[in-house]
């Protein structure tokens, strides 16, 4: 994604989210806060205003390759947005484990120093996992943002429900969302994408064998990500007797599969969808997320036609004695490209 800038308004109080925001309704000055998200390939920043209806403003995205460190990117953004670090709240969503003073990012060369951020911003930063941040935004989604995958109708998150959030991009992320009956939100971070890949058939076994030769330990992320789809394509090419030294980019594989112009791309995308279904079904069983699955991230939006061909839901629900229970669980794609920033704002508000 190239560097970009835009403005957006997002209501993050989950049960006021369906009410329209009217300009001028917040006439009193409110504290401006800063949120950011690092997903591996890109970093995004925004400023927030408001309390019950939080406005996300001055949204800017940059490739992480454009700056040597996160601090450089942060300083560039605050200067360009006219934001003065004066002790205002700050939440950073990271694609990795959000613990310790020095946070490393598996799919990015940057690291984050929590004490360094505290000194620069003059506030105690809130650091959370990027999919945990997205989970915080899910309760504010309405049906217009949900695209059904499979036959079970799409349903927004509601009080009393437990949900799973999963997405693929530079890596594979997930989080668990519980909305209590009184509306309280509980989000549990996870690094489930690094769990060991579990083959379900001979095709999966052959894929695992090839991936072991490349990586040793094979996590689901080695398959279910943009690099993972490229791994699948190159291994299928080798198995078919026409190895490729440089497989097409994941977006090209997806486009070729959707247009039926490359049989190998179609096979790779179908295998990806089936393995994703297996992973998500396992996660629902593990986490008790019986009320729904929200798939996020642009990559899965690109793959919606493929995810709706049947392989995803078939592997999702093929779990022996638990198959019938899984057949009733809705799976949807959430269309919201500011969800991580909005969720970071919601988490900061609830701190």
Image (tube, rainbow, N blue to C red):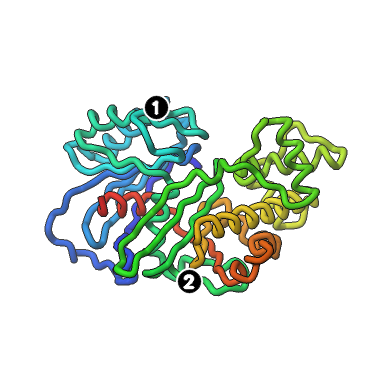
Please name whichever residue, 300 or 278, is drawn nearer the observer in this view of the structure. 278
Residue 104, position in %: x, y? Answer: 44, 30
Q: Is residue 295 left or right of residue 275?
A: left
Mark positioned earlier in the residue sequence (2 or 1): 1
Q: Residue furthest top?
A: 68
Q: How far is the residue under mark 2 from the one under mark 1?
A: 40 Å
Q: Which mark is residue 69?
A: 1
Q: Residue furthest left?
A: 28
Q: Secondary structure at mark 1?
A: loop
At x 37% / y 43%, what residue is drawn? 128
Q: Nearer the viewer, residue 212 or 227?
A: 212
Left or right of residue 123: residue 287: right
Circle 2 or circle 1, nearest the eye: 2
**What residue is drawn where x is 40% and y is 61%?**
178
Residue at the disc numbered 2? 155
Residue 226 visible somewhere in the drawing: no
Q: How many marks?
A: 2
Q: In screen coordinates, is 76 left or right of 192?
A: left
Count neighbours of disc 2 (C-alpha within 10 A) and say few if under 14, some if 14 to 19, many if 20 or more: some
Q: x and y percent of residue 249 in the render? A: 65, 41
Compared to residue 302, the image places residue 41 above or below, namely above
Question: Badge 1: how crowded within 10 Å, few (<14), some, or many (20+)?
Answer: some
- What secondary structure is marked by label 2? loop
Q: Residue at x 35, y 47 (%)?
A: 59
Q: Is residue 229 above or below residue 338?
A: above
Percent coordinates x, y for residue 155 in the rendering: 48, 71
Q: Is residue 275 left or right of residue 122?
A: right
Q: Are marks 2 and 1 in contact (CB under 8 Å)?
A: no
């Amino acid at each position: 994604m190239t560097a970009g800038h835009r403005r957006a308004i997002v209501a993050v109080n989950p049960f006021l989210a369906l009410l329209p925001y009217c300009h001028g309704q917040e006439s009193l000055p409110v504290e401006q806060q800063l949120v950011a998200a690092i997903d591996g390939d890109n970093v995004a920043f925004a400023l927030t205003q408001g309390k019950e209806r939080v406005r996300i403003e001055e949204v800017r995205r940059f490739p992480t390759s454009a700056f040597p460190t996160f601090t450089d990117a942060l300083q560039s953004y605050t200067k360009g947005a006219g934001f003065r670090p004066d002790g205002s709240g700050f939440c950073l969503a990271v694609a990795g484990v959000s613990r310790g003073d020095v946070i490393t990012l598996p799919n990015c060369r940057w690291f984050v120093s929590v004490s360094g951020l505290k000194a620069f911003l003059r506030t105690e930063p809130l650091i959370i996992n990027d999919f945990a941040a997205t989970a915080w935004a899910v309760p504010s989604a309405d049906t217009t943002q949900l695209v059904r995958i499979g036959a079970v109708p799409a349903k927004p998150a509601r009080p009393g429900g437990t949900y799973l959030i999963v997405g693929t991009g530079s890596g594979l992320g997930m989080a668990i969302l519980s909305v209590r009956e009184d509306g309280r939100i509980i989000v549990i971070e996870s690094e489930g994408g690094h769990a060991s890949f579990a083959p379900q058939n001979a095709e999966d076994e052959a894929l695992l064998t090839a991936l072991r030769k490349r990586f040793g330990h094979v996590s689901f992320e080695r398959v279910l990500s943009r690099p993972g789809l490229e791994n699948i394509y190159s291994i299928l090419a080798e198995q078919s007797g026409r190895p490729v030294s440089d497989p097409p980019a994941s977006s090209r594989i997806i486009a070729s599969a959707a247009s039926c112009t490359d049989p190998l791309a179609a096979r790779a995308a179908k295998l990806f969808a089936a393995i994703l279904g297996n992973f998500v079904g396992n996660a629902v069983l593990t986490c008790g997320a019986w009320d729904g699955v929200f798939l996020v991230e642009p990559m899965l939006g690109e793959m919606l036609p493929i995810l709706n061909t049947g392989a995803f839901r078939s592997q999702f629900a093929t779990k022996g004695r638990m198959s019938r229970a899984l057949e009733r669980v809705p799976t949807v794609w959430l269309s919201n490209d500011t969800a991580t920033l909005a969720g970071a704002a919601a988490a900061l508000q609830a701190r």
